[in-house]
Image (cartoon, helix red, strand yellow):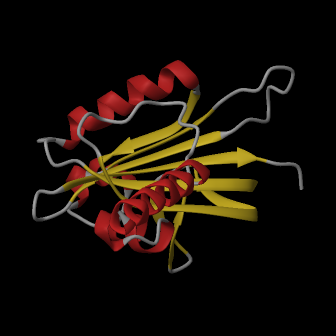
């Protein structure tokens, strides 16, 4: 009986924890997605890339970027049943187009260094892989009566050299500074 009560309490604790950490997703996840990592951050400025990574003054930086204050909910998923990054990128693009306006997107080598995207920009080495298998998209959800301000959706799809495919999704809820 004690064991049953213990299992019940642990289950309730996990349910409460997962509910408090849940993110309101304006887009659906690719079928079969397995959550690998999740993080929530409040900040006065989240660095959002609006262009491909280029070497500028001996540093890799995006061609264009903005700093957005607010809350960032980031999740990384492993897609065990996926076979190609193009199919996944198209899936997420169609999902995003229903909820937001695309500000920038790139694919393959046009995005720049996948090492920079994975290790420096997203700070997640698991996303690193050959450049030709990367896709990046950033979109902004419009807010009624405030056409220039809204939440952002960032999606990065990458395939590792081991052929494992991962997708990293960030939601940035804008707040006034």
Q: Is residue 143 above or below residue 65?
A: above
Q: Position of residue 32 (x, y in %)?
A: 23, 39
Q: Nearer the viewer, residue 150 or 11?
A: 11
Q: Position of residue 130 (x, y in %)?
A: 20, 62
Q: Nearer the viewer, residue 34 or 62?
A: 34
Q: Position of residue 27 (x, y in %)?
A: 48, 30
Q: Position of residue 71 (x, y in %)?
A: 70, 54
Please give the name of the residue rendered at 56% of the width and 53% of the height, measured from the top-left corner.
16
Left or right: residue 170 compared with residue 142: left
Quarter occupied by the C terminus: bottom right
Total label count?
0
Please give the name of the residue rendered at 23% of the width and 37% of the height, measured from the top-left corner.
86
Quarter occupied by the N terminus: bottom left
Left or right: residue 40 compared with residue 169: right
Q: Pick out the residue farthest to the front.
A: 1
Q: Nearer the viewer, residue 21 or 143?
A: 21
Q: Tell me the quarter of the picture where residue 173 sits.
A: top right
Residue 64 in view:
no
Please give the name of the residue rendered at 88% of the width and 49% of the height, measured from the top-left corner.
176
Please give the name of the residue rendered at 48% of the width and 60% of the height, measured from the top-left corner.
9
Residue 123 in view:
yes
Q: Is residue 148 above or below residue 163?
A: above
């Amino acid at each position: 009986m004690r064991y049953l009560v213990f299992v019940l309490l642990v289950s309730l604790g996990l349910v409460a924890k997962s509910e408090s950490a849940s993110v309101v997703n304006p887009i659906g996840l690719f079928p079969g997605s397995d959550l690998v990592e999740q993080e929530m951050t409040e900040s006065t400025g989240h660095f959002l890339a609006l262009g491909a990574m280029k070497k500028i003054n001996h540093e890799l930086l995006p061609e264009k970027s903005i700093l957005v204050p607010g809350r960032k909910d980031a999740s990384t998923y492993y897609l065990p049943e996926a076979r190609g990054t193009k199919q996944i990128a198209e899936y997420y693009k169609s999902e995003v187009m229903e909820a937001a306006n695309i500000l920038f997107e790139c694919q393959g080598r046009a995005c720049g260094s996948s090492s920079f995207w994975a290790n420096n920009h997203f700070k997640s080495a698991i996303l690193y892989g050959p450049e030709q298998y990367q896709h990046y998209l950033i979109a902004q959800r419009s807010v009624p009566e405030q056409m220039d301000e809204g939440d952002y959706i960032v999606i990065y799809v990458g395939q590792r050299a081991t052929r494992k495919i991962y997708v990293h999704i960030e939601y940035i809820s804008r707040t006034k500074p």
